[in-house]
Amino acid sequence: MNRHSLSRLLGAGLIVLASCGPAGAADEAQRLGVASCASSTCHGRVSPANNSYAQLNEYFLWSKYDRHAQAYRTLEGDWSKRIAANMGIADAARAPECLVCHSDYVPEAQRGPRFQLRDGVGCEACHGSASGYIDAHYGPDASHAENIALGLTPSENPRVQAQICQSCHVGDKQRLVTHEIMAAGHPRLRFELDTWLTNMPVHHSEDADYAQRKGITNGADRWAAGIAAAAVDYMDMLQAHLDGHSLTPELGLFDCHACHRPMDTTVRRTSGEKWLTPAGSIRPNDYAIRTLAVVAGLRDAALADRISQQNRTLHRSTSQSVARFKNRSADLRDTLTRAQAVVASRPLSASERAAVRRALLQTASEGYFRDYADAEQLFLALQALAAVSEADRAGQYDRLFGLLTNEQNFKPSRVAAEAGSLLR
């Protein structure tokens, strides 16, 4: 199966939330708006230029093919209106909790005269406020390093990519698709950095000139960077959005499928799960934590063991108190940050990619990819790892993908069996 045939899986999570969100909302530079990039002498050509290091048709590709250009307009649709009505919001297109991800929602003081929220998630949301670099970035003597110093976001860096995209597609300290928003009708968030970027309409060319100026990251390393960032960011979200004053915690931070499954589902809990928490407990959404432990463990086994031990402690604390849970998440965050640095220290080698693949399949075969979202991330990880391997073709995962076509009929035992067969 070609990676671009994932549209069914991707589309379900992008119906409403179609933006990567602001990259530099906290800086003081001015957003000049997409109109400042759209002329035919800048980035608004219909066809790519032949004599420039940039294609110069970036605005055209974004406006015609990229869902981010439609992010604001999504708020004016019937589905968004229904969500807003269910939440008691008069107009989704004016609500900050919607605009933070469906537009480039910077403070009014940072909005230049041509900036419009209606433009959706435009150029500067990912590339940074242009007021500092717009006059310098196209000159014959301009360098990428100088442009970054003037405010251009280094969006070629996978850690930066993860920070930009996952701020909305996963969440961060400021943004969260809450349990209330999802209960009102918003789709469950699903995201994996490399797959989503691969399936976006690309508006740059990774040629020799690009490689010299910015470097090129393969899909497996971008996947690993995304997983590491997701694990650390999840800890930050727990700290930011769990206040301990409500009768129930913010359930949007936890594993949806720990509760949302048909009541007649046959449940088979592993011995480890039985030891961690009582049946029916809320579960931390820990797929990124467990996966990061696998990747980091290739280079530091003791660090991986510490992640696993602290993750188990985090799970146990859900039945103790909010204060203890937040303390455990803070401890785990420090360990995950070290693991993130270990993973980013050098690209994954071919042998490491193979080892990660085998470890993920082994874990899945033992029943630890226990629900739909876990299995979804397993499939996306295997696809990313296969995409850079000559011997490991992505088509071998077609049967696994077939097990993900119906969320309501998901059977974890089938995923475990398929993972076992892929190990042989």
Image (cartoon, rainbow, N blue to C red):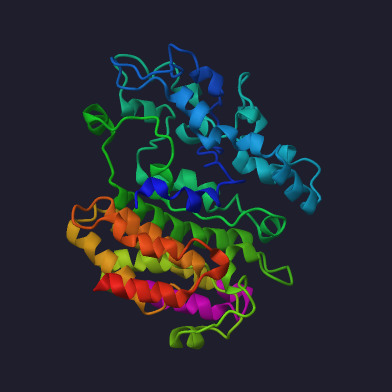
User: How many numbered marks have been drawn onto this rendered protein structure?
Assistant: 0
Q: Is residue 355 visible?
A: yes
Q: Residue at x 68, y 46 (%)?
A: 97
Residue 110 is situated, as x and y percent measured from the top left of the image, at 61, 28
* Relative depth, front residue between 171 and 223: 223
Please give left or right for residue 383 compared with residue 262 in the image. left
Q: Residue at x 56, y 24 (%)?
A: 33
Q: As displayed, is residue 271 above or below residue 203?
A: below
Residue lying farthest to the top in this orientation: 41
Please give left or right for residue 407 compared with residue 296 in the image. right
* Relative depth, front residue between 315 and 86: 86
Q: Is residue 334 visible?
A: no
Q: Residue at x 38, y 36 (%)?
A: 154
Does 307 lie within the magenta span?
yes
Residue 353 is situated, as x and y percent measured from the top left of the image, at 24, 60
* Relative depth, front residue between 204 and 176: 204
Residue 263 is situated, as x and y percent measured from the top left of the image, at 64, 78
Q: Which residues are magenta?
A: 303-326
Residue 160 is situated, as x and y percent measured from the top left of the image, at 41, 43
* Relative depth, front residue between 301 and 404: 404
Does 111 lie within the magenta span?
no
Q: Residue at x 71, y 59 (%)?
A: 180
